[in-house]
Image (cartoon, coloured by chain):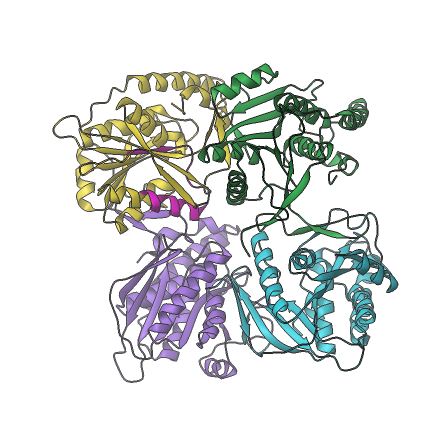
Chain colours: A purple, B yellow, C green, D cyan
Amino acid sequence: MQDVRIQIEEDVTLKDPVLVEGLPGIGSVGKLAADYLKDALSATRFATIHSKYFPPQVYVDENGIIRLVSNDLYYRKATKAGQRDLVILVGDYQGISPEGQYELTDQVLLLCSKLGVREVYTLAGFAQGHLVESPRVLGAATSPQRVELMKKYGVIFSRNDPGGGLIGASGLFLGLGKLYGMESVCLMGETSGYFADPRSAEAVLRVLAKALNLDVDLSTLEAKAKEIERIAARFRESDTKPSPEAQPKEDLGYIG
Amino acid sequence: MQDVRIQIEEDVTLKDPVLVEGLPGIGSVGKLAADYLKDALSATRFATIHSKYFPPQVYVDENGIIRLVSNDLYYRKATKAGQRDLVILVGDYQGISPEGQYELTDQVLLLCSKLGVREVYTLAGFAQGHLVESPRVLGAATSPQRVELMKKYGVIFSRNDPGGGLIGASGLFLGLGKLYGMESVCLMGETSGYFADPRSAEAVLRVLAKALNLDVDLSTLEAKAKEIERIAARFRESDTKPSPEAQPKEDLGYIG
Amino acid sequence: MQDVRIQIEEDVTLKDPVLVEGLPGIGSVGKLAADYLKDALSATRFATIHSKYFPPQVYVDENGIIRLVSNDLYYRKATKAGQRDLVILVGDYQGISPEGQYELTDQVLLLCSKLGVREVYTLAGFAQGHLVESPRVLGAATSPQRVELMKKYGVIFSRNDPGGGLIGASGLFLGLGKLYGMESVCLMGETSGYFADPRSAEAVLRVLAKALNLDVDLSTLEAKAKEIERIAARFRESDTKPSPEAQPKEDLGYIG
Amino acid sequence: MQDVRIQIEEDVTLKDPVLVEGLPGIGSVGKLAADYLKDALSATRFATIHSKYFPPQVYVDENGIIRLVSNDLYYRKATKAGQRDLVILVGDYQGISPEGQYELTDQVLLLCSKLGVREVYTLAGFAQGHLVESPRVLGAATSPQRVELMKKYGVIFSRNDPGGGLIGASGLFLGLGKLYGMESVCLMGETSGYFADPRSAEAVLRVLAKALNLDVDLSTLEAKAKEIERIAARFRESDTKPSPEAQPKEDLGYIG
């Protein structure tokens, strides 16, 4: 089989679209944000990506029906002046090897390039190692112009964070995207790193909504955040640092 | 050499055949069941699969003769009305890397697709982490119709099991099979996960025999199950949870 | 670069040659034996194999000159009636991944097949986990005829050893060789597994010399064996099981 | 994408150029030396190498601008009689798998071969496991002539070091370079292995400058070395062997 198999389900024509990427990673921030966005905007799936760089795994839903792990591309056309057409990349996994990461990112960029994408936003978490009450959104970008623009939306560009750079899809889409002539921004919500963190995802989406002039009702995400915070509070009371496994994954409706 | 090398030993023409897969995995349930089935039905080998995705290993039989590890395809034509032609996949190993899992599964599906296979049953174990007296058979499938059909044969479709999905060949044949237009069912026998478990394999085969209208004498498997249970009972008496290594592998006639 | 790069240094024409393989492995038995054999027979190197499946490593000799790790093929023509032309495979490493093992073995077999090789002897060690005073030579083969033939030379074909089969080049040359129509024998010298074991290599070479009607002076190997035994005796006295690292590798003249 | 993607930014014509390689490794000696050299000589970048054999990572500079990890080729033409044109290879990483090491080295050598390179110097560290006050420069080479030449510049060719050979790019450029008909020398600065070691890099550059008749002002490197030594002294006083993580990486201006 092909290393990366992209199944186009609908031929779409988009006008100067923006790619928004949010795959699993630190605090599930990027995944929570991108999944929420595609649902809130009622985006339409137009391509499914299977790959030998994903785990050999199927998910089973509550009715017993299986689904092969995948990444998925959605689109949503602008609905008013000042908006842009969107392509949204969501998925179950990032590539599970360095080579897989490069190959998957490159193939998605190639497809997006053909669709006219010249601008990318990647959504991610930034692990602080301690609970963060009011997560800030840190940034990285491909050009000083993008940096200045993002600062207007409250994004922090810190001299020290992220110190060692970005590892994984959120960084790679920026780095490889440059080779396709794309300008990009990575938005990183601060998070403890211990929980799936809808509060951080919310912070990231607030910035993205401003940057892309989107109307996104964040109340459901807010509710999820409050639920997590209640659970976290209980852990704090019992004076135990929760293990990553203890996070109430199932309740977050990952697979929306 | 080719990544996956399929040596066709007999050109077979089959009528709307069903693929049954049973490779090594949890409790050896799938392997025990599929090996038993192909022997009980006197199925005929028609293809041998070698691959660099298997370990670089040969087995040596009691006469000192070696055999390179492989997967093998058998067929067995219907012998009475109401039966279907069968293709049975057995083997020494699943692919030992995620890429190998995908590539091997895809190549077997491609070949089976050419043989006319449009329906797949995969056989597997489901680890409960404790001894199971009367193993139930859990299911997963590619469509609601299959789910309903399997429920009639006593298969359990549970909201919670398997929670994280299926990893390995038994799930992948369902997931990749869908891309070939195949409808599939995974039958998972409950098992402790500590022993090779012929009792669980027996439960799986009882369901499969009903679904495919097969006459399979399960008495030898029953005898093996009793032997294992005697050994397990001794472990329980000595109050020691047996290690996986302690299982009496050699006595199970793996390489039938 | 090619995955496996075979540099032919001399075009040789051989008459019904036999391949003898001895690469690093348990107790270095196969490597010690094959290296000794090619030196004792003054065999001539005709091909060097480099590969990305070897470690990215060069050796530095005592004069400061480097040599990229490799496998090497030597030949030695029959010098009297009753002998056969020989191809001898020696080297620094086996492939360091399962895929590399398959690919390297296959490419060597392909080349040997073109040279007319239809018979293979692989030399290896068999780890007993305890010191072995008089190592026996265990065998595995591709046919009952080979088994019977080897029994005449004192090779043991045991019902239980090797229980789990053979892993690595010595087994793979038999298994993949069959796909090239070659008949093969694996000769395994018993060894503790703790030391590089020239005594075991000597036992293996004695069998091989009989089988191939070779005159090989084993006195230098015998001297090495005695040296190792003196060192082992000291370890025994101090009642310490020597670690594999403690073996006096450097003194064995690996890179003859 | 290609496994190794070399982006030529300037077509250069060089006269009998020498390749100098210095990538990350033991004590960062090679990287420190090659980075310093290309800055001191105001060398010009003419090619950037991206690869799926590097980590999927971008670096973020103090302004928030990202850069995909890469290796980079610089050139610097001779400025006076007795000098040679230079190609300098620097980078963020060596290939992160054995296969990647081979492939990356081979592709760089192929390009350099086309540029006329027939001579290579690789720069590396040699870990002594203890602090080294006055690091010597150890050598390895492809020919006795090179060994003799290097001895004149004070390079030590020791019977015992490096005992097990060289692993990684610095060795591989010599080994694979021979297959391209290139003569090469590896210069290894002694280092503790606990710190990034500009003192050792300085020692290596002194030898290289003599060998290639280069005027390189080493005062900045000398200043860095003094700074490291002050830090090391403090560690020694507190009687604690510093962990590799404790090294003041950030202060060394790696990404010059």
Q: Is residue D110 above or below residue A253?
A: below
Q: Is residue B176 above or below residue A144?
A: above
Q: Nearer the viewer, residue D59 or C50?
A: C50
- The outermost residue toward the left is B81
Whether residue D240 is in magenta: the answer is no
Q: From this viewpoint, is residue C76 visible?
A: yes
Q: Position of residue D209 (x, y in %)?
A: 80, 71
Q: Nearer the viewer, residue B179 or B27?
A: B179
Q: Is residue B248 above or below residue C251?
A: above
Q: Residue at x 28, y 32 (%)?
A: B137
Q: Position of residue C144 (x, y in %)?
A: 48, 19
Whether residue B101 is in magenta: the answer is yes
Give the quadrant of the N terminus of chain D: bottom left
Q: Position of residue B62 (x, y in %)?
A: 48, 18
> In screen coordinates, is C130 left or right of B253?
right
Q: Residue at x 59, y 18 (%)?
A: C155
> In screen coordinates, is D212 left or right of B151?
right
Q: From this viewpoint, is residue A21 visible?
A: no
Q: Position of residue C104 (x, y in %)?
A: 54, 43
Stretch in magenta: B88-108
Q: Nearer the viewer, residue D71 or A149?
A: D71
Give the quadrant of the C terminus of chain D: bottom right
Q: Residue at x 58, y 63 (%)?
A: D107
Number of numbered discs on residues: 0
Examine the image and state in which quarter residue D207 appears: bottom right
